[in-house]
Image (spheres, rainbow, N blue to C red):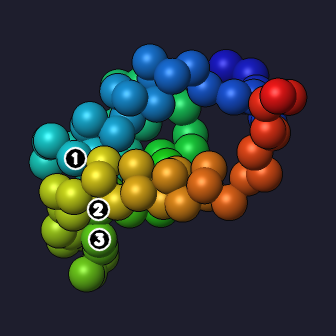
Amino acid sequence: MQQRHGRRISKEKLARIQSLLAETDMTISEIVERVGCSKSVIWSINQKFGIRNYTGRSYWLVDHNWKTNNTERNETVNSAEPRLKKAS
């Protein structure tokens, strides 16, 4: 199987990966097999959204507020963007 580098994953696949990380006891390797992407993609998504906090080699805690934390982070980023004023 030829690997593809630098491609974006779909929103549906991203949501599936986030769900598997947050709601199952599947290992990263099992998630890789299920969704068909690389370990580095799964690790990057986990790190970006802060879903699982690994405290050891095979033990992790799920941050159940990861969706809320990322919504707040996105609102902070969006509020820093300049806004256009309407012409009167």
Q: Which numbered dot is residue 53?
A: 3
**Amino acid type of the residue that numbered disc 3 sits on in the rendered structure:** Asn
Give the left or right position of residue 76, taking residue 16 as reference. right
Residue placed at 37% from the left, 45% from the top? 29
Q: How far apart are marks 2 and 1 (CA)?
A: 7 Å
Q: Decide: marks 3, 2 in contact (CB < 8 A)?
A: yes
Residue sitting at x 25%, y 81%:
55
2 and 1 marks in contact (CB < 8 Å):
yes
36 shown above or below 21: above
Quarter residue 69 falls in: bottom left
Q: Mark 1 points at which residue?
A: 22
Tell me if residue 69 comes above or below residue 16 in the rendering: below
| Mark toward the start of the polypeptide (2 vs 1) | 1
Label 3 secondary element: strand
**Residue closer to the observer: 81 or 18:** 81
The percent position of residue 31, horizontal first and vertical second, equals 34, 37
Q: Residue 52, which numbered label?
A: 2
19 vs 54: above or below: above
Nearest the viewer among 74 and 3 is 74
